[in-house]
Amino acid sequence: MKPILILIANKFFLTNYAISCILQDLEGMKVTGAQEEKLKDEIRSQKPDMIIVETDMLKQDSVRLMKEIKEEFPRLKIMALVDSEDLFNLKRLLDLGLDGYLSKSVTKEELQRAALKVYNDQKYYSQDISRKIFDPEFNRTLSEKLSEREYEILRHIAEGLNNKEIGRLLFISEFTVLTHRRNIMRKLNVKNTPQLIVESIKRGLISIGDN
């Protein structure tokens, strides 16, 4: 019988090793690691059945990367190890409809159970993530978070682009960019661009490596 091949994307060797040991305790599972910058190449060459990605440890935008992988490899099972307290990025990842969502406090038994369920075409959510999905307060809080377009514009602001340059890049008017920019500043309760950048970094919306 062909082994179930799982690819792990995580920058920490010990985490990769721990996940590998836990999953390879299950009969028929083979686990290998992949560097983030080579992840898509490794998927093409190794053709895994499933990938496990620790999303908040990626250098790039994890949501964008997961979306690209879903589009290019629609039959690939994807499980995300997530920070369940990072509400904004958790919501963005949930909107992608991945196959499994595990909190970083996952136990050995839960990791094994989740991998088997996802491989057998069942969705899996850690208990604390499930609670948030059905928590009205979680969804109410997110109503004041940034939209995907606002998040995209924020990233371009962090890159140092002005309104005209952003508009040209996104094929929208300079006025539309300005409107989005004002909404972003209102939602983050800041008054100028330096405050916007600082607050965005504090909230984890962008990282220093983004600009």
Image (cartoon, rainbow, N blue to C red):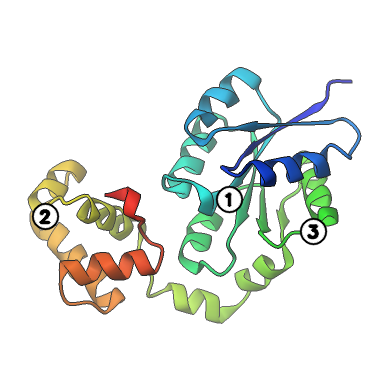
Residue at 55% x, 33% y: name it: 35
Measured along the vertical axis of the image, is residue 194 above or below residue 48?
A: below
Cα separation, mark 1 vs mark 2, equals 32 Å
Locate residue 197 relative to residue 5 in the image: left or right: left
Cα separation, mark 2 vs mark 3, equals 46 Å
Q: Residue furthest front?
A: 14
Query: Front-most of 167 and 84?
Result: 84
Q: The disc labelled 1 sits on which kind of residue?
A: Gly
Contact? badges 1 and 2 (CB < 8 Å):
no
Cα separation, mark 1 vs mark 3, equals 23 Å
Residue under numbered circle 1: 97
Q: The disc labelled 2 sits on which kind of residue?
A: Asn
Q: Which mark is residue 107?
A: 3
Q: The disc labelled 3 sits on which kind of residue?
A: Thr
Residue under numbered circle 2: 163
Circle 2 SS class: helix
The image position of residue 166, as x and y in percent, is: 16, 49
The residue carrying pointer 3 sits among few (fewer than 14), some (14 to 19) or many (20 or more) residues within 10 Å by Cα, namely few
Contact? badges 2 and 3 (CB < 8 Å):
no
Foreground label between 1 and 2: 2
Locate residue 43 relative to residue 19 in the image: left or right: left
Circle 1 SS class: loop
The residue carrying pointer 2 sits among few (fewer than 14), some (14 to 19) or many (20 or more) residues within 10 Å by Cα, namely many
Q: Earlier in the sequence, mark 1 or mark 3?
A: 1
